[in-house]
Amino acid sequence: MPRTYIDDFIKLPITKMAQAISDMTFAYQETKVPKEHYKKLLGKSYEELVETTVSVKLVETIYNGLSGLQKESPRLFFQAFMLLDLGIKPSALTASQYQALTVIADTFENTKQKHMLDTKLIEQFKDIDENGVMYQLKRGQSDED
């Protein structure tokens, strides 16, 4: 098997690894990221990196559970989501709240809405995903000026 860049890269000290990554990043559309950024990331403890991985795994577990419930009964899932969002426990649901819940579930089903969350939150997620949080923060500052 031919020798590759990674074979030599993994033998470099952190400072040289950081510089190499910075150079590779620059090679992509001349994007400048200081080597100190990569040096800091490469120097993180394993525990710090594992914490993120564990968090993503927990979100995945909850997601899979919710996804299964939504597929099983979309209407009941929506109603439970609505009550959760409103902070109303099903055991404390009044007759008028149940009526409102039923009408809102009918409306949601009839209008075939794509999202249950506030559209502003959906748009904010998409904006951060596409542009990064720093862009959004800078844009928010210029809106206040």
Image (cartoon, grey):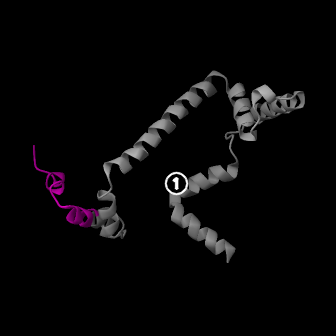
Q: In the rendered image, which quarter is residue 26 located in?
A: bottom left
Q: Position of residue 128 (x, y in %)?
A: 55, 57
In this picture, which residue range is highlighted in magenta?
A: 1-21
Q: Residue at x 20, y 65 (%)?
A: 16
**Residue 12 magenta:** yes
Q: Residue at x 27, y 67 (%)?
A: 23
Name above or below for residue 69 compared with residue 63.
above
- SS at mark 1 in the image: helix
Q: Residue at x 78, y 31 (%)?
A: 105
Viewed as shown, does residue 95 lie left or right of 44? right
For the residue pair 92 and 109, the one nearer the viewer reads as 92
Q: Position of residue 116 (x, y in %)?
A: 69, 40
Viewed as shown, does residue 117 lie left or right of 108? left
Name above or below for residue 98 compared with residue 33.
above
Disc 1 residue type (three-letter): Asp
Residue beneath disc 1: 129
